[in-house]
Amino acid sequence: MELFVQQLLNGLTIGSVYSLVALGLTLVYGILHIPNFAHGALYMMGGYVTLTAMSQAGLPYGLAIVVSMVAVGLLGVLMERLVFYPLRDAPPLHDKIAAIGILLFLEAFAQFVWGADYQTMPTPYGNVITVFGLTLTVQRILIIASTVVIMILLYLFLKKTFIGASIIAMAQNREGANLVGINTNKVAMMTFLLSGGLAALAASLASPINLVFPGMGHLVILKAFVIIILGGMGSIPGAIVGGYILGFSESLGATYVSNDYKDIIAFAILVIILTVKPNGLFAKEGH
Amino acid sequence: MAVFEKRRLWLAVLAAFALAFPLLVTNGYYLHMMTISFIWMIAVYGLNLFAGYTGYLSLAHAGFFAVGAYMLGILTVKAGLPFWWAFILSCALTSLLGLVVGLVALRTKEHFFAIYTLCVGYILYLVIDKWDSLTGGVRGFIGIPAPSDIGPLSFQTPVAQYYFVLVFLFAVMFVMYRLVYSLTGRTYIAIRNSEELALTLGISTMKNKLASFVLSVFFTSLAGALYASFIRFLGPDIAYVTVMFDFLTYLLVGGIGTLAGPVVGTLLITFLSQQLQFLQDYRMLIFGPVLTLLIIFYPHGIAGGFIRYQAKRAEARRLEQKANRAAAELAASRQGRGERHVKEG
């Protein structure tokens, strides 16, 4: 029983990270209908920028995360301006290939600047505490708590502010949003900023537990795709719920099925879902 | 007609060059590079058939390439089958796997298809990487035999292996050529251009997409089997996404949806990679942006761009001729009228 609860907690931690990544991905998909394969590279850059800000500039962990969120958010905006904006009228095949090109470039760039080694990110929250007989590190609590805070903030931003509402409006209907005078360019840039920031936050939170290396985004991005298909492409609550579902099934699967094949679980879920419902769960009708 | 004849001539020259290459270049390293790029070309033709002509981006093809290669290794080394049986079986079994994947994957469209196949590719990679007892896992798979002799033909020397691969490349190119200019090929292009329209015309898109997918997997697995028999050592990284991206780069640089594209792109990029060898792992610093810039500014690739240029020139010539004819007619009619005027006057 204790093992089970421990695994649930693990699932909650992993799920939080997945949810944050999937949120960024689903926001971009909702607005621009691009499956942004380069999102994993943004995640990876987030990890490196935080690490560099801590080790080179000597910033404290919290401040380093903020720096990283801004930097990677701006990188996302740059990506939108330079690549996805010129491709807005191109066939869908082109966006995907361009995104793959960016992914390759950023990975090679990270390897060039920071080397191919696996690096650890020291954190002030590594100490272990015991709650109700469960041992967990403060870092894990931090991950879970800050994810919840960010999600609430994001919800308030999208529902209560004008910019947030215009993001949602554009996700619902691009032409319609344009007609009522929403600057779609600005909204697209805003979305990429948010998406990059969320990816950087996720990476910075997860890195002290995992490691920082150029390929760290690969699996995460693939799983984020699984999540947004699970939760409905472009759906924000779907991304959150899907992230936690995947987190739980992985941590339980790793314990009770096989640790070696735990990464396959996500893809098996996806294959099953798409086999039964080719447009994903919760597909919008008539779309 | 003249254009067609000229193209035939070009093809003959290129084929002759490919045939004479081992005689012209005695450097073993270049021969090796050429053979390996022929193998990539076959795989890229597989990808081209499905992404270029049928319009679906499959990201599982590196996985199928690896399955074809590993299948040959397993069938010859672990099952002890004779080489040729293993060769045929490995292509057949991989195509069968392609059929099963295609049956499910092709129910999805566009983005979903790309993501689905990306995940299939990753599953194939993970299975190869983790299934130690069968594939050797990260340590790799060794001891794959070279093709066994057929009568007097032996495939032991590098030159013989070069011709061995070249024969398959010619065969694949021939099949692709016949296919693209056939009704079936036109059907695929119709599906690429508009699936709804194709459906309205009474084309069974599912059946056609499936056939195209399986054939495309077949080409890719053939390349995999050739790779296994040529390199004779396999690691799980041949199933990894980077190989997939290499295929995509070759295809895009050459020209997606063109017959010459895979050859042009593969040769050019392999050659450039050789020149950029000092960059090693950082070559993607250049190829990544190249891929992205290409898709933004020059999405048709070299072969595609050339075809468009020719078409544009032909169109310009046609227009010019038309204009000339019209001008001549106008002049003639004016003259006629002028003569009438004279008469009347």
Image (spheres, rainbow, N blue to C red):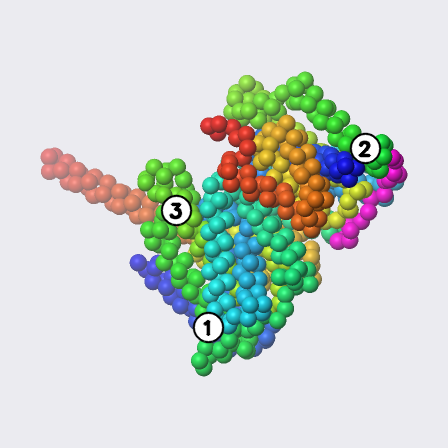
Q: Please state which amino acid type lies under the numbered disc 2.
A: Leu
Q: Which mark is drawn over residue B19?
A: 1
Residue B244 screen position, x and y as percent: 58, 53
Q: In the shown orientation, is residue A95 left or right of residue A20?
A: left
Asked whether the viewer can see residue B142, the reply is yes
**Left or right position of A276 against B134:** left
Q: Which is in the foreground here, disc 2 or disc 1?
A: 2
Q: CA distance from mark 1 to mark 3?
A: 38 Å
Q: Residue at x 51, y 75 (%)?
A: B148
Location of residue B142 by image quarter: bottom right
Viewer-proximal residue, A144 or A170? A144
Task: Report in which chain the residue with disc 2 lies.
Answer: A
Q: Quadrant of residue B191?
A: top left
Q: Amino acid at mark 3?
A: Lys
Circle 1: residue type: Leu
Tag 1 and tag 3, C-beta contact below 8 Å: no
- Residue that mark 3 sits on: B207
Q: Along the horizontal axis of the image, is A255 left or right of B202?
A: right
